[in-house]
Amino acid sequence: RFGVGGGLNSRGKRSGGAPSTAQEFRTTSSVGSVGKLQALTTSELDSKARLDQVMSQPKVIVENKADLTVTADDLRPMVRKLEHSAIVETLTLGFCKIDDRGVEMISEALHTNDTLRTLHLWDNKFGAAGGEALGQALAVNRALIELNLRTNDLGPKGALGIAKGLFKNTHLAVIHLRYNGIGDQGAKALAATLMQNSTLTEVDVARNRIGLDGTEALMKSMTHNQTLTHLDLQRNNISDKGGLAVGLALKINTSLTHL
């Protein structure tokens, strides 16, 4: 259970076997169930009429049916509305190939928005700079409860930026970071935050090339943290010694129910 199979690429993805996160979300998420009014195609991002219509709903999903790259310029009209929106509570921008600049723009909106509760940015193209911008937003944002960043390129530096933001954040409860290649350095940064965080209840760092050092740091944090209930470490390079660290932490921790 604690060892990991091989075949991981630079982003921590398996080169074969298990489905990718993108495939997982395509099979578990249903845009149709949200309704046509809330679903906006990437080609409609510059339509004021459609934006006004969609952004008047609590749930907004952007569908990238044409497999386009959504640029910062494409996002600008939506982000401007998001900055002061008092309606939108959930925003999904998955599979949109958004880069660092696009995420930086979204992050800027999070500095002023006090309504958005859930932000899905899974399967895009941003990296460390995007992670640092999101971290800065998390340090001041008091609305977000769930942040999904699965399948991007945060790396250790991006994870450090997120961790710094979480150190000051007192509202976020759930964060998904799997498939981001954060490695031991990123895991250590998150562990330092988890030592003192009393808000997070779920952290997903699966498939991130975390080894023994990162595992031991996370487990040490679990001997102090009594709020986290879910910690996903699957498909990492934990090793038998890391498994021992897990066992020792579980003797002390009383909050974890899923590991």
Image (cartoon, rainbow, N blue to C red):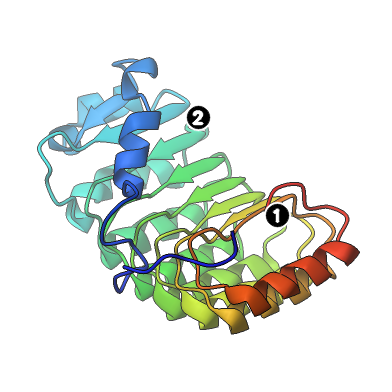
Q: Residue at x 53, y 83 (%)?
A: 185
SS for dot 1: loop
Q: CA distance from mark 1 to mark 2?
A: 24 Å
The residue under the point 38% across, 49% down is 121
Q: Position of residue 91 (x, y in %)?
A: 42, 38
Say whether residue 164 is visible: no
Q: Upstream in the sequence, badge 1 or badge 2?
A: 2
Name the amino acid type tagged 1.
Answer: Leu
Q: Quarter of the image containing the N terminus?
A: bottom right
Mark seen at residue 87: 2
Residue 213 left/right relative to 62: right
**Mark 2 neighbour class, 10 Å CA radius: few under 14, some 14 to 19, many 20 or more:** some
- Along the line of sight, which residue is nearer the eye, 178 or 68? 178
- Residue 234 vs 55, above or below: the answer is below
Q: Residue at x 88, y 55 (%)?
A: 254
User: Please, what secondary structure does the residue beneath circle 2 have?
Assistant: loop
Q: Position of residue 50 (x, y in %)?
A: 23, 25
Q: Which residue is mark 1?
A: 200
